[in-house]
Amino acid sequence: MPQVASEYTPPFLFRNGHFATIYSGIIRSVNGVVQKRERIILSDGDFLDLDWSNSKTLTKKLVVLLHGLEGDAQRPYITGSAKILNQNGYDTCAVNYRGCSGEPNKMYRSYHSGATEDLIEVLDHILNTRDYSEIYLKGFSLGGNLLLKYLGEDNNVPKELKGAVAISVPCNLHDSCKQLLSPKNILYAIKFKGNLLDKLREKQEMFPDKISDADIKKIKTLKDFDDIYTSKAHNFKDALDYYEKSSSLQFLPSIKVPSLIINAKDDSFLGPECYPVKETDENSHLYLETPNYGGHVGFWGKNNITYTEKRALEFFNSI
């Protein structure tokens, strides 16, 4: 489908991409969402924690929420999504990736941008234990890449899965990595790297034979982290191999359910290859909206409801 015209026109302060990003990630808070945790055991013996929140009315509709890099199901962009969806007749299931629910996962591997095998197990669990006739996916950043890759892979997408919304998506992971390594994003990169290294040191305590102090000292950038840990723990040759095989861009032509991508033009995490204009034009199931503003998972909105929270609800209701 052609690109979707955007109506997002935030106040002056939120026309600065960095301010929008920081406000959403650090300042914003969301109250009133009650989550109930369920732990599922994966086929390899590891676990995932799912945080459920329910509509006030009985419903057959569910949205599975997927967070970004080093996020979790309590981030405001997840709870904000859950709140508006719950208020409008949708249950939500917010997935905490391996190691992201406050407890280290059991295995040396963890999560990554292309780990669709875990999403498949979550959907299988939901279909086997719940009675939903309509299921939707909503993902942010890494989670957006994950859901788009899943939808475009040669998977047996269940008939109950009706549509998806992906926000601030690094469709080309190498392109996004290059942006994160640039000076404009140095503060974000330092924060991400610090969080990832903290978790890697936990892994070292659990698996001292797999990662050494010398390995950890070599990690100066996010790409180094992917070279030394992410790629090796998840059976890729190196970081570039991981980026190439896990980027959702190559899978977009094969998506067959209605899917909306919202990537702001002022998102400092995204390079030119992260705006899939050609792929969207050539696939009638894909919609691309590129607002001038919004930053990375920013998109401020009135009454503490973000623009993308309203757009996702509208999109799901229209399918």
Image: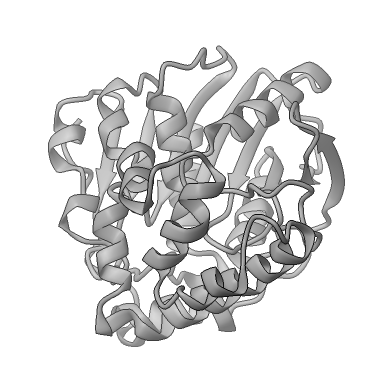
Q: Position of residue 95 (x, y in %)?
A: 68, 46
Relative to 64, does residue 258 appear above or below in the rendering? above
Q: How many marks?
A: 0
Q: How is the image coloured?
A: one colour
Instruction: Tell which of 53 and 105 is nearer to you.
Output: 105
For the N terminus, which image quadrant? top left
Instruction: Write the residue at 52% across / 12% down.
Output: 156
Question: Would residue 36 be seen by someone viewing this image from the given angle?
Answer: yes
Q: Nearer the viewer, residue 183 or 261?
A: 183
Quick one: 33 or 42, which is closer to the camera?
42
Position in image of residue 78 (x %, y %): 62, 57
Q: Is residue 14 above or below residue 71?
A: below
Viewed as shown, does residue 309 lie left or right of 18?
right
Q: What residue appears at the point 40 percent right and 23 percent down from the top-left corner?
A: 153
Which quarter of the image is occupied by the C terminus?
top left
Establish if 182 lies above or below 45: below
- Residue at 24% x, 57% y: name it: 175
Q: What residue sits 21% from the left and 61% below the top?
A: 271
Q: Position of residue 37 (x, y in %)?
A: 86, 48
Residue 69 rendering spot, x and y as whole percentages: 52, 60
Left or right, 11 with respect to 30, comes to left
Q: Is residue 16 visible?
A: no
Q: Is residue 238 above or below residue 122?
A: below
